[in-house]
């Protein structure tokens, strides 16, 4: 199955299950707590962190990608990835993490 078809399936299923915009229901503060607990070993998750154990992209860099959207990140987090540990995130937790990453943007998403 082509990767773009799989991504489309994930997006449709996740959007139906979320029942609305990920950004509206998300809690960036909770996402920050989750990031510090689960993601900080591999990613720089905030400005107070000095280093990580891998070369995973900093959350600030993810937030500033030109194609960034909280929904895209939340859906990415819900799909298994070979380079990332398998964290059993709920849809709400994925949305919260994505909202936290979005909160790191210095300029608005267009």
Image (cartoon, rainbow, N blue to C red):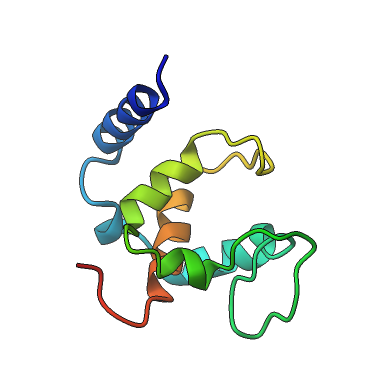
Depth order, front residue of 62/88: 62
Question: Residue 15: x and y, percent?
Answer: 26, 37
Question: Vertical placement of 31 versus 4: above or below?
Answer: below
**104 left or right, relative to 23:** right
Name the residue located 56 percent from the left edge and 33 percent from the top edge: 80
**34 left or right, relative to 2:** right
Question: Image quadrant for the C terminus?
Answer: bottom left
Question: Residue 8: x and y, percent?
Answer: 30, 29
Q: Residue furthest bottom?
A: 48
Name the residue located 68 percent from the left edge and 63 percent from the top edge: 37
Question: Image quadrant for the N terminus?
Answer: top left
Name the residue located 36 percent from the left edge and 82 percent from the top edge: 106
Question: Residue 13: x and y, percent?
Answer: 31, 28
**67 left or right, relative to 20:** right
Q: Residue furthest right?
A: 53
Question: Vertical placement of 48 versus 62: above or below?
Answer: below
């Amino acid at each position: 199955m082509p990767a773009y078809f799989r991504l489309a399936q994930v997006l449709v299923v996740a959007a139906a299950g979320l029942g609305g915009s990920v950004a509206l229901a998300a809690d960036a503060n909770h996402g920050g707590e989750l990031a510090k607990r689960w993601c900080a070993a591999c990613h720089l998750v905030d400005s107070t962190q000095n280093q990580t154990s891998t070369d995973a992209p900093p959350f600030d860099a993810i937030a500033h990608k030109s194609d960034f959207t909280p929904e895209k990140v939340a859906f990415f987090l819900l799909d298994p990835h070979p380079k990332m540990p398998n964290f059993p995130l709920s849809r709400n937790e994925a949305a919260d993490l994505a909202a936290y990453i979005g909160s790191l943007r210095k300029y608005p998403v267009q």
